[in-house]
Image (cartoon, rainbow, N blue to C red):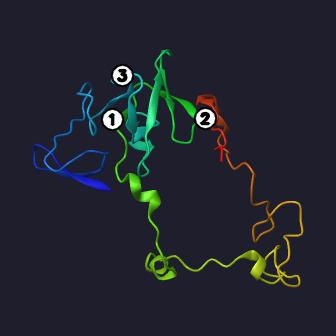
Amino acid sequence: RIALVVYADGEKRYVIAPLGLKVDDTIISAERAEIRPGNTMPLDNIPLGTQVHNVELQPGRGGQMVRAAGTSAQLLAKDHQLYVTLRLPSGEERYVRKDCLATIGQVGNVEHGNIKLGKAGRKRHRGVRPTVRGSAMTPRDHPHGGGEGRSPVGMAAPKTPWGKVALGRRTRRNKATDKYIFRRRTKKRR
């Protein structure tokens, strides 16, 4: 969800709506502000343990992390000269520059993940085309295709339609920012 903010000079802008923000609430973006949901300030001025969202990765670039519905990151430490440590929703802990801005609180619309579309039609109204399983195709259309009846994949690992390994393959490429990751995300326990 987004919230329409009207500035003192009459200018209007949209912001990501934090949990608990209501119509007629006042939010402040400043170097120092009250610790209230919706207020934005540098990470250095936010107390430890605070939940934040819409976090900048580089000062002045605008929020890039923790923007999805219901998410929040936690400020863990400020023991570094230039960086603070954040725990992201994935469980990853990473360093972010102290002068980067972040908004206090959790992103609103927490129930977003529980929405059941209920039928194929609602998915189509959103512009999503039907998903056909690879095992229902012919061998010329997909590596999982063919066979008599319902056949197993027939290979060590499931593949994409283009023959690449589908599950468990690492996709992270940006080695330059590896040094900012303090602890990699851990697998979710079922």
Rendered residue at 58%/36% (across/down): 92
Label 2: element kind: helix
Task: Check the image and report above or below for 1 versus 48.
Answer: below
Q: What is the spatial separation of the Cα atoms under label 1 and label 2, in whole angstroms?
A: 25 Å
Q: Which residue is mark 1?
A: 104
| Tags 3 and 2 touching, CB below 8 Å | no
Label for residue 47?
3
Q: What is the spatial separation of the Cα atoms under label 1 and label 3, in whole angstroms?
A: 10 Å
Q: Amino acid at mark 2?
A: Thr
Q: Where's the N terminus, which quadrant? A: bottom left
Q: How would you rate the neighbour count of disc 2 (Cα within 10 Å): few for under 14, some for 14-19, many for 20 or more? A: few
Q: Amino acid at mark 3?
A: Pro
Q: Based on the displayed image, in which of its 4 quarters is residue 181 positioned?
A: top right
Label 3: element kind: loop
State the residue in front, 100 or 185: 185
Dot 1 or dot 3: first in sequence order is 3
Q: Amino acid at mark 1?
A: Ile
Q: How would you rate the neighbour count of disc 3 (Cα within 10 Å): few for under 14, some for 14-19, many for 20 or more? A: few
Q: Which residue is mark 2?
A: 177
Rendered residue at 75%/52% (across/down): 168
Task: Check the image and report above or below for 81 versus 18.
Answer: above
Dot 1 or dot 2: first in sequence order is 1
Q: Seen in the image, is 138 located left or right of residue 177?
A: right
State the residue in front, 21 or 13: 21
Give the x, y percent position of residue 133.
Answer: 71, 76
Label for residue 73?
none
Rendered residue at 44%/64% (across/down): 115
